[in-house]
């Protein structure tokens, strides 16, 4: 298998699995993605203005997700991405039937 292809697939699958898990387990991420709730919008704007007062003016709402603690299942997500990338990049096995 091509190492470059494997790493490309691994990165894509790791990102996909990690984002899917964070959406499923974090109300914070879902609240950031949902922009129809006025209370959430106000809370995010308050947080961003407070961070600007502390000297971090270039922070946006999506960057707030970086404040979350790391996922304890990140190692397992990496293994899942490795396995999926390996089988995604491998050619399908061919079987020869003997007459």
Image: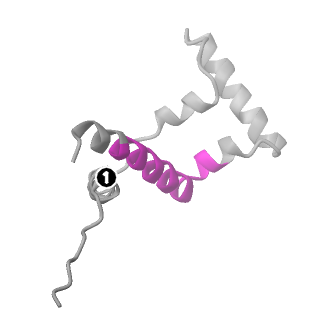
- Vertical relation: 88 (above or below) 50: below
Vertical position of residue 98 compared to residue 77: above or below: below
- Please provide percent x and percent y for residue 7: 29, 40
User: Is 30 rendered above or below residue 47?
Assistant: below
Furthest residue toward front:
99
Q: Is residue 42 left or right of residue 77?
A: right
Residue at (27, 58) in percent of width and height: 83
**Apparent side of residue 79 relative to residue 66 in the rendered image (left or right):** left
Q: Quadrant of residue 45?
A: top right
Which residue in the protein does label 1 denote? 89
Question: Could you classify mark 1 by the number of other residues whose Cα lies within 10 Å: few (under 14), some (14-19), or many (20 or more)?
Answer: some
Viewer-closest of 16 and 51: 16
Which residue reaches farthest left? 98
Report how many numbered discs are placed on residues in the image.
1
Was residue 15 drawn as part of the magenta stretch in this picture?
yes
x and y, in percent, of residue 98 in the image: 16, 86
Q: Secondary structure at mark 1?
A: helix
Quadrant location of the C terminus in the rendered image: bottom left
> Can you name the residue that lies furthest to the top here?
55
Residue at far bottom of view:
99
Residue at 27% across, 36% down: 4
Residue 76: say if magenta.
Answer: no
Image position, residue 23 (x, y; %): 56, 53
Main structural element of the magenta stretch: helix, strand or loop? Answer: helix
> Residue sitting at 44 percent across and 44 percent down?
15
Q: Which residues are magenta?
A: 9-30
């Amino acid at each position: 298998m091509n190492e470059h292809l494997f790493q490309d697939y691994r990165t894509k699958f790791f990102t996909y699995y990690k984002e899917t898990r964070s959406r499923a387990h974090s109300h914070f991420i879902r609240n950031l993605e949902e922009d129809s709730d006025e209370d959430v919008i106000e809370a995010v704007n308050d947080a961003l203005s407070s961070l600007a007062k502390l000297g971090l003016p270039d922070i946006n709402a999506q960057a707030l997700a970086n404040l979350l603690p790391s996922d304890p299942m990140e190692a397992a997500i990496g293994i899942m991405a490795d396995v999926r990338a390996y089988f995604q990049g491998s050619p399908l096995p061919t079987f020869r039937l003997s007459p």
